[in-house]
Image (cartoon, grey):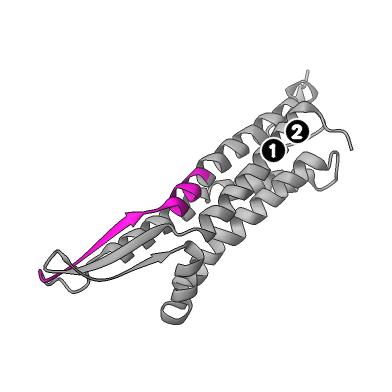
Amino acid sequence: MKFPQANKIGILLVATTLVLLFLGLTLPCIEVSSKMFGFIPLGSDKKSILGVIDKLLTTNFLLAMLLVVFSIIIPVLKLGLTLFLLIVKNSKNNYLVELFVHNVGKWSMVDVFSMAIIVSMLTFDNLRIKIFSTEGELMAGFYFFLSYGLLSITTTYFLNRQVRNEPTRGLGNIDNSTNKTD
């Protein structure tokens, strides 16, 4: 199957974004360590987003499901549909898929916000006693997830530019010359 150069770039962007998302979800994103009196280690734990979701399934099911929806389902669905748009041309459903991808893109910051909540939640010192302290350190998974978010926005921008430059596809490409009334 032959693809135009612009579609090859788009497909490469989507594939790279999927890899970044996978790494961001599976690699540890934060290491939390606890100390007593500021120097006696009590323990530490490294968690990936999937690890946090797994832990939250038993303690806070609603938060776990929100993370699953906004950090896994929506990003994978959006990238899959973006790939569909780059590969399948002139489908009857392209306009609806483009509209869906465009509207889902508005929710792309929710996964970043959910990541911020996780980081805050895991580093917050619940005891509020000066004897114990909790420290958090960001790890590779966080940076891969951040990179996924930024590249996802770039990919959506690229797709929107592609759509506007192709007269056979709909989103944002209204030809005003056919709507003129004399």
| Quadrant where the C terminus is found in the figure | top right
Asked if residue 164 is among those painted magenta in the image, a careful observer would answer no
**Amino acid type of the residue tagged 1 in the rendering:** Leu
* As drawn, 87 above or below 67: above
Locate residue 126 relative to residue 56 in the image: left or right.
Answer: left
* As drawn, 30 above or below 176: below
Q: Quadrant of residue 55?
A: bottom left
Q: Secondary structure at mark 2?
A: helix
Residue picked out by circle 2: 8
**Amino acid type of the residue tagged 2 in the rendering:** Lys
Give residue 12's mark: 1
CB under 8 Å between discs 2 and 1:
yes
Residue 28 x/y as whole percent: 45, 59
**Residue at point 62%, 38% (across, down):** 155
Q: Secondary structure at mark 1?
A: helix
**Residue at point 29%, 59% (across, down):** 136
Q: Quadrant of residue 130?
A: bottom left
The crowd level at tag 2 (other Cα within 10 Å; few <14, some 14-19, many 20+) is: some
